[in-house]
Image: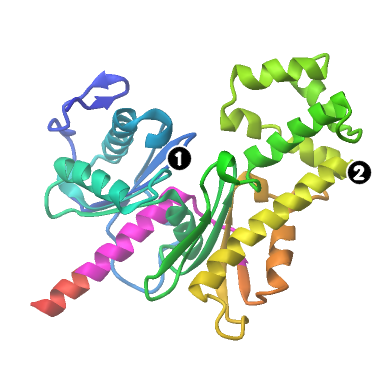
Amino acid sequence: MKRYRNGEIWDFEHEVAVATNRPVILGLDGGTTSTVCICMPIMPFSEALPDPLPVLARAVAGCSNHNSVGETAARETLEEVMADALSKSGSNRSAVRAVCLAVSGVNHPTDQHRILTWLRDIFPSHVKLYVRNDAVAALASGTMGKLHGCVLIAGTGTIAYGFTEDGREARAAGAGPVLGDWGSGYGIAAQALTAVIRAHDGRGPYTMLTSTILQTLGLSSADELIGWTYADPSWARIAALVPVVVSCAEAGDEVANKILKEAVEELALSVKAVVQRLGLCGADGKNYFPLVMVGGVLEANQRWDIGKEVVNFISKDYPGALPIRPKVEPAVGAALLALNEFMKECVQEAYRR
């Protein structure tokens, strides 16, 4: 199979000539917008991680969600970003000990198996390989590589994903806007666009969203909004209007405020569904569990703090929820997850000897 790097056909067998042999791990966070790969050295096993973490290299490429760009293009992107990270770190494939690939679109064991089979063709047999949904990397970025608790991602899309300490997992939402991810950036903005059209033709109340969105997009009438929307209905392009919705809500617009309040409820319900299915809250509903908050929708604004409102909504039923804003990016979380899993397997192998 042809492999690509920087847009050119690349022979994966040709490694960096000056590569060192220090053992490294790779952590990948792949989404619909971009893919990030982190290369880190194998660190001695201890309870405390060094601060700052010893990141050897960081590489960025495009979309790696096979549902968005197709399987071939997704693989090429993943291979390119791994090769770039190894090159920047002065390493090669033979130095890799573990890889955690966390990619959006991995929603079923068949997705994992397909990607694992492909990765096994690339890396030597001794390399430990882990394939997860990108939400897992986001969780690990808040828990520093430990799979316990729940993560809520709310950016262009949204998903809630959780793990118990004994390895059980559950998810809610994350099926895309057509299937009800209305707490996402896309969902918020799409409802705002709908509100503008409804106000324009008399089916809905007046909203300052009309003038603000039209001005933002450089349009002169709501009729032109139809052409703008369908000219390129990509999720990220629509979701970019979320700050406009927030600004209108902060200015007192009732329609915009209603959209954001409904988004808060949807996001909180996703988390609560995961918590209930896994019993993260304990029998009395008060047990502590980490709640990792990731994504632009959850960032604080002047007066409308969606993330804070989501936490308040959840805490009414689950006071043990401990909100965490990650200090490292999801790709680093994936690398730490790879490190933790690698060290566990090393310990287990040592006991078996």
Q: Quadrant of the C terminus?
A: bottom left
Query: Secondary structure of the magenta portion, mostly?
Result: helix
| Numbered circle sitting on residue 252 | 2
Q: Is disc 2 placed on a helix, strand or loop?
A: loop
Residue type at mark 2: give it: Gly
Where on the picture, by quarter, is residue 218? top right
In this view, the residue farthest toward the left is 353
Residue 324 visible within the image: no
Q: Quadrant of the N terminus?
A: top left
Q: Is residue 325 above or below residue 65?
A: below
Q: Is residue 130 above or below residue 241?
A: below
For this rendering, which residue is in front, 338 or 327? 338
User: Horizontally, is 309 left or right of 91 in the view?
Assistant: right
Residue 25 visible within the image: yes
Residue at left 21%, top 41%?
118
Where on the picture, by quarter, is residue 191? top right
Residue at left 13%, top 55%?
126
User: Horizontally, is 69 left or right of 272 in the view?
Assistant: left
